[in-house]
Image (cartoon, rainbow, N blue to C red):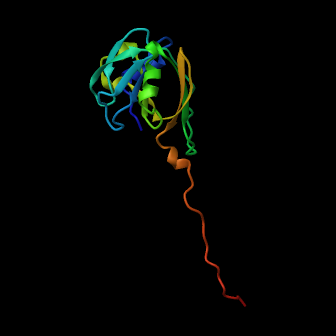
């Protein structure tokens, strides 16, 4: 379970606050950030914050709309879909050079007034890109699934040996 700082809890409880989301796309290594990890934020200007590995990074502003992330205790597969601006046709270039399916995506929430400590971020979603559902000149739509998706899969089947004993 993730521990939230007291400052994060206080900021979230305020009647007015300034939340943004940070998106880390792992197009290279899937375990740690490298040169092929791309950083985006939902703010209208570039911001500096720590990546998941704790290294300060600049997050590029990008128009992002995403679906709600369901919370369930029934071991259901968490899924989120998002629509991202195709700025400078960067997504088109990635789709031509890299297969995005199976690539890791981490979505975190932070407040603009709490960009002073890496502990002030809350991981909202950590999963992989399942499918690129639509690509246009202006946007790209992707679908992501939780990395724990295998928990909802039944493995094997129940088997029982035939008993040939007659009772009575």
Q: Residue furthest left?
A: 55
Snapshot quadrant of residue 30: top left
Residue 51: percent from the left, percent from the top?
A: 32, 26
User: Up-down: is 80 above or below 44?
Assistant: below
User: Up-down: is 117 above or below 17?
Assistant: below
Q: Residue furthest bottom?
A: 168
What residue lies at 54% left-to-right and 57% top-to-bottom? 155
In the image: residue 134, left or right of residue 114: right
Choose between 24 and 5: the one closer to the eye.
24
Residue 146: percent from the left, percent from the top?
A: 49, 38
**Quarter of the C terminus within the rendering:** bottom right
What residue lies at 38% left-to-right and 33% top-to-bottom? 3
Snapshot quadrant of residue 36: top left
**Quarter of the N terminus within the rendering:** top left
Choose between 16 and 161: the one closer to the eye.
161
What residue lies at 66% left-to-right and 87% top-to-bottom? 165
Residue 119: percent from the left, percent from the top?
A: 33, 26
In the image: residue 91, left or right of residue 46: right
Residue 18 visible within the image: no
Snapshot quadrant of residue 100: top left
Choose between 100 and 93: the one closer to the eye.
93
């Amino acid at each position: 379970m993730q521990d939230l700082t007291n400052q994060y809890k206080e900021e979230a409880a305020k009647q007015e606050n300034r939340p943004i989301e940070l998106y880390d796309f792992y197009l290279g290594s899937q375990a740690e950030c490298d040169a092929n990890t791309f950083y985006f934020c939902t703010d209208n200007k570039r911001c500096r914050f720590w990546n998941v590995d704790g290294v300060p990074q600049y997050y590029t502003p990008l128009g992002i709309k995403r679906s709600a992330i369901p919370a369930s205790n029934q071991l259901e597969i968490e899924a989120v879909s998002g629509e991202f601006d195709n700025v400078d046709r960067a997504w088109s270039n990635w789709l031509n050079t890299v297969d995005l399916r199976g690539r890791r995506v981490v979505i975190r929430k932070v407040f603009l007034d709490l960009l002073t400590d890496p502990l002030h971020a809350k991981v909202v979603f950590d999963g992989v890109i399942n499918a690129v559902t639509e690509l246009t000149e202006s946007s790209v739509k992707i679908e992501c699934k939780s990395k724990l998706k295998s928990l909802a899969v039944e493995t094997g089947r129940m088997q029982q040996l035939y008993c040939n004993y007659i009772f009575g």
